[in-house]
Structures are given as structure tokens and as C-alpha cells.
Image (spheres, grey):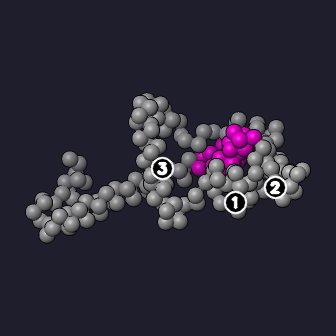
Amino acid sequence: MTNDERLRFVPAQAYASVEDMRAAEIEDEIHALTTAMRVIAQAIDTRSKAVSRVSGLTIPQIVVMQAVATRGEVTTSLLSRHCHLSAGTVVSILDKLEERGFVERYRNAADRRIVHTRLTASGESALADAPTLLPPVALDGLARLSSGERRAIVSSFEAVAGLLRADGGVPG
């Protein structure tokens, strides 16, 4: 038991009911979750600044470029769904990438309302030179885990993301 756990430990008989004990457990779990989320948010912010400093690209720009590279010539709505970003955010990102010559957009010949995006040679080069989105220490740590442990982490993160999306806190 850690010092933090000892400070919060309350004997079961101190609770008026099982419901009170459960409420206290939930409160402790929420505290632990929000603490972990703050640490993760700070790490993401730090990594985002480092990635931007090295590559001149933001993490969302790299995510969109990776999706275009993986999916080929894609529509904005497909990018939005694939990257879990709003269509407006994707359009804004594509505008900036297009200004820099990293992507080009063109209208579908059969239906002019549909706009496709593809990477340019310059975009492919910038993406190839971009650092990994996770810091090397995190990649090394993940590589040391078993496949089952990695799947459990992914599953937990997806569950938290789903909880946030259910409340409208994260674009779906």
C-alpha cells in the first residue's frame, strides 16, 4: 500500500452503508483517473510542442497526413471519421497543408461536390521526416510489453475515449 493509499484508507465500519463505501471507492477511482489523465495531457502537450519544433507540423496535421498516406486519395468526410476530428477541423488542417504544398485537393469528375485529397511528393517527404507521435521512451516501453498487455492498454484508452465521446467531450 502506497502512502497515498494509506492516507485515503478508511475502515469499512466507518461507512454508514455499502452505498457510502461504494461512493467513496468511486470517488477515489475518479481522482486516480483524472490525475492520470492530467499527466497524459501534459505529456501530450510536451510531445506536441517537440514534434512541432522539429517538424514544423502539428500532431493533428501529421495524423491527417498519415491518414491520407494510408487511405490514398480520400474525401474530407472519410478523413474526419478516420482521424476522429470534426469536418471543419479537417478542412482547416487541409487548408494549411495545401498552403505549404503538402497536399492537393481536387474535385471528383463525376460529382463536383466531392473533394478528394492526396499527398504531394513534398508531403510524402515531410511525413517521412516527421518524428513519431509517441516519444521513443513510450515506444520502447510498449515494445517490452506482451501483446495482451498492449491490447489491454488500447482497450482501456478506447473505453475512456468512449466515455468522453458519450458526453460530447470528444469528436467521434
Quadrant position of the C terminus in the picture:
bottom right
* Location of residue 73 in the rendering, given as x and y in whole percent from the top left corner: 78, 44
Nearer the N terminus, badge 1 or badge 3?
A: 1
Residue 107, given in percent of the width and then of the height, sits at 86, 53
Q: Residue 52 placed where, x, y %?
A: 65, 48
Mark 2 neighbour density, 10 Å: few (under 14) some (14–19) many (20 or more): some
Question: In screen coordinates, is 89 left or right of 147?
Answer: right
Tell me if residue 126 comes above or below residue 159 in the rendering: above
Q: Is mark 2 on a helix, strand or loop?
A: loop
**Label for residue 114?**
2
Residue position for label 3: 158
Residue at 45% from the left image edge and 59% from the top image edge: 163
Residue type, numbered disc 3: Glu
- Outermost residue, front side: 110
Please give the label number shown on residue 124. Answer: none
- In three-dimensional space, the C-alpha distance between marks 2 and 3, rounded to whole angstroms, equals 31 Å
Taking the magenta stretch, the answer to whether it contains residue 51 is yes
Direction from residue 75 to residue 20 in the image, left or right: left
Describe residue 83's horizontal placement relative to residue 120 as left or right.
left
Q: From where the camera sits, is residue 68 visible? A: yes
Of residue 12 and residue 109, the one placed in the foreground of this image is 109
Query: Which residue is disc 1 drawn over?
Result: 87
Q: Position of residue 112 (x, y in %)?
A: 87, 57
Tell me the magenta residue range: 48-72
Of circles 2 and 1, which is in front?
A: 2
